[in-house]
Amino acid sequence: MAKRAGFATRIGAIAASVGSAVGLGNIWRFPYEAGENGGGAFILVYVLFVLVLGIPVMLSEFIIGRSTHKSMMGALRELMPGSRVHWFTLVCIAGSVITLSFYSVVCGWVCEYLYLSLTGQLTGHSVQEYGGIFSTFVASPWRCLGWTWLFLAVNFVVMLGGVQRGIERMSRVLMPLLFLLLIVFMVNSLTMPGSAQGLKFIFTPDFGKLTFEGVLDALGQAFMSLSLGVACMVTYASYFQDNSSLIKDAGVVAMLDTLVAIMAGIVIFPAVFSFGLAPEAGPKLVFEVLPSIFQQMSGGAVWCVLFFLLLLFASLTSTISLSEISIAFAIEERGASRNRATLWCAVVVVAIATLCALSFNVLDQVKILGRDIFTLLNDASANVFMPLGGLFTATLVGWFLDRRVVRGQLEQGDTLSRRLSPCVVWCLRYVAPAAIVLIFLHYTGVL
Ligand code: PHE
């Protein structure tokens, strides 16, 4: 089989992985999860999970992808010949499709806010009115659907044209810009009256406020934010060059991703307390708070447009990586053409995303396991599919893969990697599987 084209540079490989990792997970989901789960203690547990579970699980995906230069199913077939483990890929695909479906609804919200800010409708309101703007918007089925469909259309046209790499290249300029913007907003939030209370909320852990469900949420959030458990990083690593240090690359991706999430927290919470809003507002939190923040900045209207535009771009690089999983599967395993594969993926995702968008209005009475459809899929992807995928790759690489392959991959690059490699293997064999299983068992009431 011809060797696949790789990322030309190490930076290219890291940038694509960061592009996948940084998105709504950091800027929308992290603040509201932290807000719902009491702030500081949640964030501390989250960072701990990134270090002891996130980075090792990311490495397990990197090892599977780079040692075979194939995406998940082909890679598993090559690494574990004669077994049936490659079928686990289907679970990853289900996870990625579900994630893409609810995620694109939130991308639709960002589109609406970009539109509102471009047309000047997002300025000149009170904090309470911004809450009303969000509620009125999500209550309107056609508006929600329209933006979700439009976003998905752009996403799948990008996939169809095979121009993902072009988008990823552009993101190398736009992502740092988003980062800079967050720094400006952070400085602004820190100078707000009452900002100390917000900082106290995120940096002073109060474990009395963290429930066990909050611990599972932190686990799910770590996996969601780092794009783990759905074989996404396997696919990206299949394009990595053979001689770079995987440990360093995973460390850089995890660090940047966590930094962006914490920065988003520092932007949001001082403002939440300064405006007297509730930190536990849930998914609408940042959509209510951000416009109020821009409102009191000089040149706020311009900041607002710029921010939602960049956020949309960051989200697009995440949805591209999510779409790639099932499209690559259909092409490589089912022999579909790129067009057919993209079309099928689009049909399924649009159908599920439609249900998600309608769960705020027409279908708001439909409850499954006590949750509306959007919340169900949001919870299922982060708290079930992703940790399950992580459990699978960690166990596979920790226990079943040829030790020489694992060591060879982990020790490539530099002496630091050689030193850290046993530590990573230990996390993959014991810490990650034990932690995920224990949290699952506790959550389901077995323990
Ligand atoms: N990590 C992305 C985010 O935080 C979401 C994502 C999950 C992307 C899984 C790819 C795979 O926005």
Image (spheres, rainbow, N blue to C red):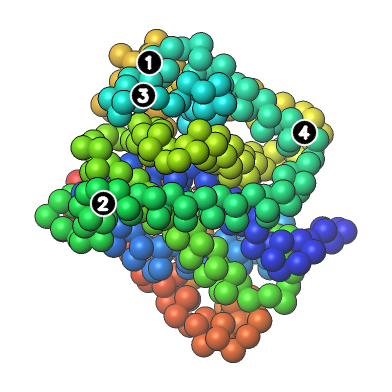
Q: Is residue 228 visible?
A: no
Within-10-Å neighbours for mark 1: few <14, some 14–19, many 20+:
few
Within-10-Å neighbours for mark 3: few <14, some 14–19, many 20+:
some
Which residue is label 4 attached to?
Answer: 160
Which comes sooner in the sequence, label 4 or label 3?
3
Mark 4: amino acid:
Leu
180 horizontally vs 207: left or right: right
323 horizontally vs 167: left or right: left
Which comes sooner in the sequence, label 3 or label 2?
3
Within-10-Å neighbours for mark 4: few <14, some 14–19, many 20+:
some
Between the C-alphas of marks 4 and 3, the distance is 41 Å
* Secondary structure of the residue carrying numbered label 1: helix
Q: Viewer-nearest of labels 2 and 4?
A: 2
Which residue is label 1 attached to?
Answer: 136
Q: Looking at the picture, how far across and down is residue 107, in whole percent? A: 53, 32
Mark 3: amino acid:
His
5 horizontally vs 314: left or right: right
- Residue at point 63%, 44% (across, down): 317
- Residue at point 29%, 62% (across, down): 44
Which residue is label 3 attached to?
Answer: 125
Mark 1: amino acid:
Thr
Q: Quadrant of the N terminus?
A: bottom right
Which residue is label 2 attached to?
Answer: 195
Between the C-alphas of marks 1 and 4, the distance is 34 Å
Determine whether 358 is above or below 56 in the image.
Answer: above
Which comes sooner in the sequence, label 2 or label 1?
1
- Give 30 or 392, whichever is nearer the viewer: 30
**Disc 2 within 8 angstroms of ligand 1 (CB):** no
